[in-house]
Structures are given as C-alpha cells and as structure tokens.
Image (cartoon, helix red, strand yellow):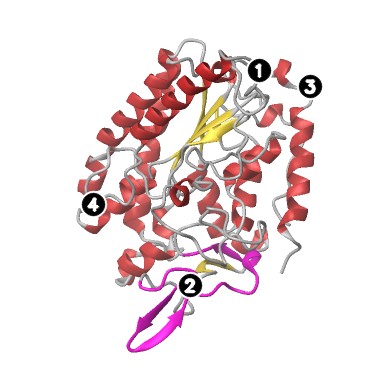
Amino acid sequence: MRGPPHAAAVLLVAAAALCLGGRAEELEASSPEFNYPAVFNFGDSNSDTGGRVAAGFESIAPPYGSTFFGSPSGRFCDGRLIIDFLMDAMDMPFLNAYLDSVGAPNLRAGVNFAQAGCSITPATATSVSPFSFGLQIKQFFAFKDKVTKLLSKGDMYRRYIPQSDYFSQGLYTFDIGQNDLAGEFYWKTEDQVAASIPTILLEFETGLKKLYEQGARKFWIHNTGPLGCLPQNVAFFGKDRSQLDELRCVAKHNRVAKLFNLQLHALCTKLRGEFAGASITYVDIYTIKYSLIANYSRYGFENPIQACCGYGGPPLNYDSRVPCGQTASLNGNLVTAKGCKDSTEFVNWDGIHYTEAANFHIASQILTGRYSDPPFADKMPFLIKPKF
C-alpha cells in the first residue's frame, strides 16, 4: 500500500517544473519544448476527459473518479489520466471536453476532442462511438472557426478562449488506434487485423496533414499499448492458455500492437521530412506499459493484470456482463462490480483502462524523455521517481 496519489502528483509537477523553467533555448528544433500556450488533444478513452459522457452516449457511476475527483468526472478511471498528469507537468489546467458546456468551461489553454470508444477509421453502424478521428478533426476546425469569429468581436471572450496564435504555437496530442485493432479481433484473424494497419494509418496521416495545413506545427503522438494484457482481452481470448505469453497476456494482440507501432513510428519519421517547420514526437507507450506489467512489484504494485473494479475475483476480476460500478442479474442473483480497497495496488482499473496510480507511473516515464523519438532525456535536469 502506498501514499495518496495526490501527494505523488506534487513530485511530478515539482520535478517537471525544473524542466520547464528556462530550458527551451537549449532544445533542438525537433524536440519538445514544454512551453505551449494551449493543448489540443485527439483520442479515445485513454485520454477522454468527459466527451463521451457529455455526448449522452453513456453515464459513469461510482467508483469511477473516486480517487481524485471524489465522484465520476467523465474519465474511465478512478482518477486522473495520463493527459491530466502531462497537463499538470506543464503547469496547465486539465483539458475540458469539447462537448461539455456545463460549468462554463475555460477553453483558453486548449480543448479535448477525445471520445471513448472511437477509432481512427470512420465509424460504421456497429461502432461504439461515431466520433472517429476524422470527425474529431472536423470538430476542431469548427472550434477554431468559432474562436476566430469571437476574437473578432473584441475582448469580451478572450479570457475563455485561445488566442489566434495559440493554434500555431499549441501542442497537438494524439492517443488513438487501440479500438481499431482490439475490436477487429472478435471477427478477424491475426493476419487480417495486421493487414488492416496500413489503411488505419493512412487515415491517421490524412488527419495529421489536414491539421498541418491549418497551421499545426507541434505534434505529440502516443503509440498503442499492449492490448493483450487487458483483462477484457485475456478473459475472452485467453481461455486457451497456449495463446498467452510469459506475462499471461494474449500474444497475438501484442504482436499486432507492436506491428502497428512499428508502422506508426515509420509514418512519424516520414512526416518529419514532409512537414517543414514542424516537430513530431513519437512516444513509446507500449514499452512503458509492458515494462510496468512485467516489473509491477518493482514499482510498488501488487496486481499487474487483475482489474481493481470488476466482478469475478482473481485472477482477472472481470466479467463483461457486469461492468465496473454496475449491477446485473447473473443466474437469478443480483451482483455488483465493486472497486477494490486500494487502487494504488492495481495496474488495471476496470478491465480496459489503467488506474490513476498506473497513469501516474506512465506519465512519469514519459517525462524522462527516454521513450520518445526524438529523445529528450539529455535535456532533462531531473529524473522522476515513479513510486508514490
């Protein structure tokens, strides 16, 4: 059992502050500067700060949000996400969801277009979410156009919306692609899912080019994590133990995830040569997450794959019929998927998403700069300790 997550966040922010203060002039043009007026995020549930809930597609019940916010915050987590910790590290407020207008959100420092369940490829009638990557980009353009019009009316709205130059100076972050791969395994072979990767990435490239043409210059791109280590996938695809690797993760899911990441990395390299004046940072989330699962005890965790909030007990504590926080009838009995006593002991939160504790660790590793291309570890005057 470890100390409270909010105490750890103080370490993360304090250490990151050392990085942010007065170092920008030492960074190469291709490296991130961590000095942005705004952040515009695109993604799925890994970085959704309330978009899906605001759209009315789904409600989230306790114990979601219980660790940090005290109640559900629209995030599919017990607390903060990776994007929240990265915003903290840059001394910026959490990003409001684009569709969430409740509470007079301040969008001056950016906005979040991420939607849980979305994919890079266009949505179909059977998609979990209609807000694909292409639609998120259309929302961004609509937002930018609205902001431009409001700025032309004087100073009345300036304190709530980005300034016009924020769109060229801001950081554009991306964490998307997991659903394009994971969902396909239910009706396709491994080879068929792998064969779809070029089409997925072509759609992603098209979106990035549209943003670049509209003035985006700072790109921060996360690759996808080890899909085979999610309890949801282990429960469905891991019944045949021969399909699991040494960490008890579904091997074929992870093989495809690594292939996707290899091609995504190549795309980022290619675009650096095509996007004049742009910086493109590729972040190896897969390696960070897989290392966390493989070495969980070293980082203070006790359960690498078992879900904190779920039903069924060890080894997975996951049952797709009883989602986290909900009650369902199984064999004539009402059962509830409850949260664990201490989420800081768990890597996985609800069978699909990571706990706040795990997200803090991942963000800490990202900020060392060692998992990025181009790397920026040599630009960091600190080393964040990932344990709470």
State the mark number for residue 380: none
Q: Position of residue 343 (x, y in %)?
A: 62, 66
- SS class, disc 4: loop
Q: How crowded is mark 2: few (under 14 residues within 10 Å), some or many (20 or more)?
A: many
User: Distance from label 4 to label 1 (Cα)?
Assistant: 45 Å
| Residue pointed to by mark 2 | 310
Q: Which of marks 4 and 3 is in front?
A: 4
**Is 191 included in the stretch rendered in magenta?**
no
Above or below, 339 against 209 in this view is below
Q: Nearer the viewer, mark 4 or mark 1?
A: 1
Q: Gap in Å between the C-alphas at discs 3 and 1?
A: 30 Å
Q: What element carries label 3?
A: loop
Q: Three-letter amino acid code at disc 1?
A: Asp
Q: Position of residue 220 (x, y in %)?
A: 52, 30
In the drawing, what numbered circle is on residue 126?
Answer: 4
Residue 155's tag is 1
Q: In the drawing, does residue 44 fall left or right of residue 217?
A: left
Which mark lies nearer to you, 2 or 3?
Answer: 2
- Whichever of callouts 2 and 3 sits on the residue coming sooner in the sequence is 3
Which one is in front, 274 or 258? 274
Residue type for callout 4: Thr
The answer to the question of whether label 4 and label 1 lie on touching residues, with beta carbons closer than 8 A, is no
Between residue 301 and residue 207, name the one nearer to us: 207
228 on left or right of 150: left
- Magenta residues span 321-350
Indicate the amino acid at tag 3.
Gly
- Which label number is shown at residue 22? 3
Measured in 3D between alpha carbons, the distance from the residue under mark 4 to the one under mark 3, in whole angstroms, is 50 Å
Q: What is the x, y in percent for residue 213?
A: 41, 14
In reply to whether residue 326 is colored magenta, the answer given is yes
Q: What count of labels does the image hold?
A: 4
The C terminus, quarter of image: bottom right
